């Protein structure tokens, strides 16, 4: 399994709305096309990327057109930050956690917790953040 499927450092300037600061992404959700013999093949019809700056600070997320179209949250664009980002992440939290389990070692190297534990805590924290806005 190639680490660059999950964590990607840009070699060129990002095309995201945070282009001047956007230095890497973490893939939080994608289609699993094939998962045999430890080799995971991904599709990108439905995806969520977490965008980070040069020191790892979260800039926001980008979502695929498919997720943009299927969500009932009615966002204006496919790049989300703040409360909109948290609402979308909470909407897809179970799928995200399950997907991140496929890359558990990479996830733990970034967040220092297994995906299941991280997202259990994240739900509580993100809900509190939304309530306090």
Image (spheres, rainbow, N blue to C red):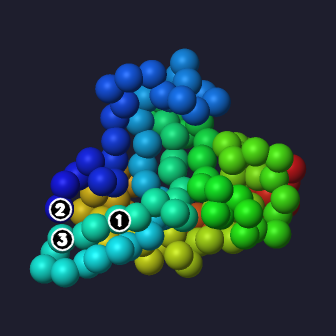
Report crowding for label 2: few under 14, some 14 to 19, many 20 or more residues within 10 A (C-alpha).
Answer: few
| Picture disc at residue 42 | 1
Horizontally, residue 23 falls left or right of residue 65, namely: left
Horizontally, residue 127 falls left or right of residue 28, namely: right
The x and y percentages for residue 39 are 18, 71
* SS for callout 2: loop
How much space separates mark 2 and mark 3, taking CA atoms?
6 Å
Quarter of the picture holding the N terminus:
bottom left
Give the answer, above or below, for where 40 lies relative to 11: below
Q: Mark 3 points at which residue?
A: 39
Report crowding for label 1: few under 14, some 14 to 19, many 20 or more residues within 10 A (C-alpha).
Answer: some
Give the answer, above or below, for where 9 lies relative to 116: above
Q: Nearer the viewer, residue 86 or 118?
A: 86
Q: Which residue is drawn at 60% across and 47% down?
A: 62
The x and y percentages for residue 32 are 38, 73
* SS for callout 1: strand
Q: Which residue is drawn at 69% across and 52% down?
A: 85
Q: Mark 2 points at which residue?
A: 1
Q: Which residue is drawn at 65% across and 64% down?
A: 67
Report crowding for label 3: few under 14, some 14 to 19, many 20 or more residues within 10 A (C-alpha).
Answer: few
The x and y percentages for residue 112 are 34, 56
Q: Is residue 102 visible?
A: yes
| Picture disc at residue 111 | none
Q: Are marks 2 and 3 in contact (CB under 8 Å)?
A: yes
Disc nearer the start of the sequence (2/1): 2
Give the answer, above or below, for where 26 lies relative to 120: above
């Amino acid at each position: 399994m190639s680490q660059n499927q999950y964590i990607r450092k840009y070699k060129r300037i990002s095309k995201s709305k945070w282009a001047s600061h956007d230095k890497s992404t973490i893939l939080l959700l994608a289609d699993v096309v094939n998962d045999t013999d430890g080799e995971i093949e991904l599709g990108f019809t439905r995806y969520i990327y977490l965008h980070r700056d040069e020191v790892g600070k979260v800039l926001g997320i980008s979502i695929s057109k498919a997720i943009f179209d299927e969500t009932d949250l009615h966002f204006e664009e496919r790049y989300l930050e703040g409360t909109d980002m948290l609402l979308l992440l909470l909407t897809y939290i179970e799928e995200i956690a399950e997907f991140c389990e496929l890359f558990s070692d990479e996830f733990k190297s970034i967040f220092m917790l297994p995906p299941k534990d991280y997202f259990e805590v994240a739900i509580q924290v993100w809900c509190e953040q939304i309530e306090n806005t």
